[in-house]
Amino acid sequence: MATYVLVHGGDRDGHIWEGVARLLRHQGNQVFCPSMKSIKETTLQHNINEICELIQANQLNDIILVGHSYGAMVITGVLNQLSDAIRCMVYIDSVIPQSGKSLFALLAENGFNDESLGLTPDTPCIEPLLFDENKLKEKLKAYIHCLKSEFSAATKPFYDNLIKTSTTNHWLYFDLNTTHACMLTQPDALAVILAGMQVL
């Protein structure tokens, strides 16, 4: 049995994971799908603290920590604070965080702004994330790229770069031929990938 913490993106809540969570629980796994405070009303650090508090309150260990979209920033902040409790990280159709940079700064470096992507400059998206990059480099990680995502042009540079460094930086990578919200459109395929992280 494995323990999963599934972290949603910025304009969603924990219910988005229901299909995937049901499949993982059916296999005997423990699955948490917290709903974070809306990015319209909070900060990135507050969302990070919410997930850390969940982990600590439930005394979770050996966690497969999954972040979708904006959730990538959150799980990286959680890793920085609770690295010993985390087995591996899974990033779904997202940027790959860099210390000292915000979500929108990372997108801007690749020629995208919030307006072109239909996003709004909410505080968590423009708040820089500071973390120990060695903790991320040393942890086993997987990236899931959604080929039909409305954000695929913006996320592909991150995906392409991690493929080049996958061996030295402990990355696995997968493609799903679906849209950004793959947990809704292909829950079975996503659950298979996440279940596979248990045996690595």
Image (cartoon, rainbow, N blue to C red):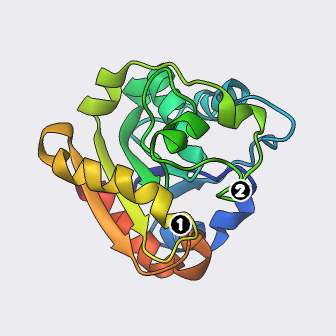
Amino acid type at mark 1: Arg
* Residue located at (13% from left, 39% from top): 168
Kindly give the residue lying farthest to the right in the view shown: 41
Give the labeled residue for mark 2: 14
Kindly give the residue lying farthest to the front in the view shown: 111
- Rendering coords of residue 75 (x, y %): 52, 38
* Residue located at (17% from left, 50% from top): 164
Q: In this orientation, does residue 74 appear?
A: no
Q: In this orientation, does residue 137 appear?
A: yes
Figure check: 189 above or below 82: below
The 10 Å Cα crowd at callout 1, few under 14, some 14 to 19, many 20 or more, is some
Image quadrant assignment for residue 85: top left
| Secondary structure at numbered mark 2 | helix
Q: How many marks?
A: 2
**Which quadrant of the rendered structure holds the N terminus?**
bottom left
Query: Residue 64: which disc?
Result: none
Amino acid type at mark 2: Gly
* Residue located at (70% from left, 33% from top): 124
The answer to which of 56 and 102 lies nearer the viewer is 102
Query: Residue 25: which disc?
Result: 1
| Mark whose residue sits in front, 2 or 1 | 2
Figure check: 26 above or below 77: below
Q: CA distance from mark 2 to mark 1?
A: 15 Å
The 10 Å Cα crowd at callout 2, few under 14, some 14 to 19, many 20 or more, is some
Image marks 2 and 1: residues in contact by CB distance under 8 Å: no
Figure check: 52 above or below 117: above
Q: Judge left or right: residue 12 versus residue 117.
A: right
- Rendering coords of residue 8 (x, y %): 64, 53
